[in-house]
Amino acid sequence: MSNWYDDAMEKLDYAKYKINKLSNEVKSENAPNNKFIKNEINDILGNIRAPLDYFAKHIAKNVGAKAKTPAFPIATGEVDFKNRYGKGINIDDANLRNHFRSVQKYNGSNWLNELNKMNNNEKHQEVNKTVINTVEKVGHFQHKGVTLNNVSFENVGTPMVEKIDGVTREIDITSAAGYKKEVLYRFKYNDREVFESLKEYHTNAVNFLEEGKRIIDKIESD
């Protein structure tokens, strides 16, 4: 097994550990402060993004015709992809070329584009912003003919109320079966739930590298 793969999987294993740890910590009564959480999230992004560069640079430097400017090709279209692949990878192998093509946004895959943009933003401009919403979940609730089953209210801000004889009263749902209140983190960049996104990026990166290694091992053995 080559060193690039060991290093890549080490980074990704660490990212998975941090995702699971932080996603549990934010739900606890002793949750870290928001500044810490934001920086931890950005650290995770970097640990998912870096292994992809390890793969690209291993290929460019050690497999076949060596590329002049080793880089993972992230393109805006097919012409741009061919140009970036030629400069950054420079391996004339259809399986490998299609493998890199499969994760391009113009080809219908958006996870790498999102990951790359947020990681670059954090490195060169500012810490990626997160939007913090409050979510109230109700398992079962009945009130005067109204029944709620497995309902979530995100960032409602105002309580449920009723008006009786001209008097407005708050309806207390906190005693409902299955009631719980959680904090939900969303990336401001794409309005996606943070931990759901990080898990998706992580899974896709692992799958991409595992298949990439299989392709490279075959090229090197031929």
Image (cartoon, helix red, strand yellow):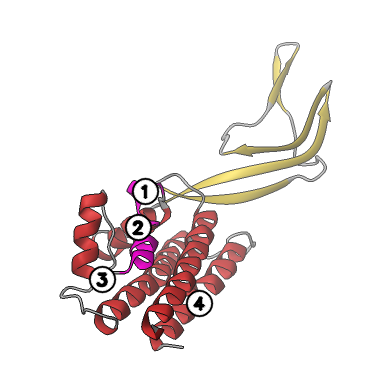
Q: Residue at x 47, y 60 (%)?
A: 201
Q: In which quarter of the image is residue 97?
A: bottom left
Q: Quadrant of the C terminus?
A: bottom left
Q: In which quarter of the image is residue 117?
A: bottom left
Q: Where is residue 21 in the image (x, y as percent from the top left)?
A: 58, 70
CB within 8 Å, label 2 to label 3:
no
Q: Where is residue 75 in the image (x, y as percent from the top left)?
A: 26, 54
Label 2 vs label 1: CA separation? 7 Å
Q: Kindly identify which numbered label has been placed on residue 14.
A: 4
Give the residue furthest to the top: 165
Name the residue beneath numbered marker 1.
Answer: 107
Name the residue beneath numbered marker 2.
Answer: 101
Q: Residue at x 39, y 63 (%)?
A: 99
Judged by depth in the image, the label closer to the viewer, 3 or 4, is 3
Q: Earlier in the sequence, mark 3 or mark 4?
A: 4
Badge 3 crowding class, 10 Å Cα cut-off, few under 14, some 14 to 19, many 20 or more, is: many
Q: Which of 104 and 112 is in front in this view?
A: 104
Which residues, given as a range, are shown in magenta? 93-108
Query: With 96 as the anchor, is 141 left or right in this view?
Result: right
Q: Earlier in the sequence, mark 1 or mark 4?
A: 4
Judged by depth in the image, the label closer to the viewer, 4 or 2, is 2
Q: What residue type is labelled 2?
A: Arg
Q: Kindly identify which numbered label has been placed on residue 89.
A: 3
Q: Earlier in the sequence, mark 2 or mark 1?
A: 2
Q: What residue type is labelled 4?
A: Tyr
Judged by depth in the image, the label closer to the viewer, 1 or 4, is 1
Q: Where is residue 60 in the image (x, y as percent from the top left)?
A: 26, 77
Label 1 vs label 3: CA separation? 19 Å
Q: Which of 213 and 151 is in front in this view?
A: 213
Q: Which amino acid does label 1 sit on?
A: Asn
